[in-house]
Amino acid sequence: MGCTNRCEEKLEKKFPKADEAVDLSLLEPVLEKYAQSPGSLITILQKAQDIYNYLPVEVLKFIAARTGVKPATVYGVATFYTQFRLTPVGKHVILLCQGTACHVNGSENIMTALCDELKIKEGETTPDGMFTLQNVACLGCCSLAPVMMIDGETYGELTPDKARQIIRGISKQEQGA
Ligand code: FES
């Protein structure tokens, strides 16, 4: 068995396939545009993640096949950069800053409140697939510490109660949607 096969097996064990099948045809326009451009692997992975919300193993294999880049290289790049996710995330990704300014201003308390509100731990996704909670390093707006970002929007000067209210607001909007 070659190294590539072993790498694939290892990866599939670590990142099991999602239940539903992945529609690879969604990636066709991206591959048509970039597959033959040298040095565009990261761009393809970014666009694939935008489409699927994460990078399923099937998609990584497909990208390797279509670009001619070795699967081990594609997996290596996808696992090296923290911007890439290899497991599914919720519809709303909560990034709670744990940088120094946020830490000294009580980000731990915000995390406790969010875990309690969502009934999950850091790094987990709610069973309904609505929220994923993740710690991140400095979000670059330390004057507003403690800070979290949800779907690209920044929420600053958080208190545990304010954080809970923000989550409840999003949940309410979802229920009304
Ligand atoms: S430390 Fe949290 S935004 Fe900089």
Image (cartoon, rainbow, N blue to C red):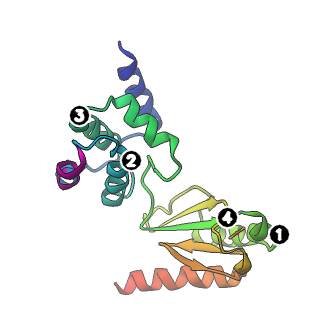
Looking at the image, residue 80 lies above or below residue 141: above
Instruction: Return the residue at label 1.
Output: 104
Circle 1: residue type: Val
Reading the image, the residue beneath label 2 is 42
Q: Amino acid at mark 3?
A: Ala
The yes-or-no answer for disc 2 within 8 Å of ligand 1 is no
The kind of residue on which mark 2 rests is: Ile
Give me the disc on residue 65.
3
User: Mark 4, residues whose alpha carbon is within 10 Å: few (<14), some, or many (≥20)?
Assistant: some
Q: Is mark 4 within 8 Å of ligand 1?
A: yes
* Residue 6 image position (x, y, % from top left): 40, 21
Q: CA distance from mark 4 to mark 1?
A: 12 Å
Mark 3 crowdedness (10 Å alpha carbons): few <14, some 14-19, many ≥20: few
Q: Earlier in the sequence, mark 2 or mark 4?
A: 2
Mark 1 close to ligand 1, CB under 8 Å: no
Instruction: Compare marks 4 and 1 and give the one earlier in the sequence.
Output: 1
Q: Are marks 3 and 4 in contact (CB under 8 Å)?
A: no
**Spatial separation of the CA atoms under disc 2 and disc 4:** 23 Å
Picture coordinates of residue 78 (x, y %)? Answer: 44, 42
Which label was assigned to residue 138?
4
Q: In what element is the residue under mark 2?
A: helix
**Eye-nearest disc, 2 or 3:** 2
Cα–Cα gap, marks 3 and 1: 48 Å
Mark 2 vs mark 3, CA separation in Å? 15 Å
Q: Dot 1: what SS? A: helix
Circle nearer the viewer, 2 or 4? 2
Question: How far separated are the C-alphas under marks 3 and 4?
Answer: 37 Å
Residue type pointed to by label 4: Cys
Task: Give the secondary structure at mark 4.
Answer: loop
Q: Who's the residue at 39% across and 82% down the image?
A: 175
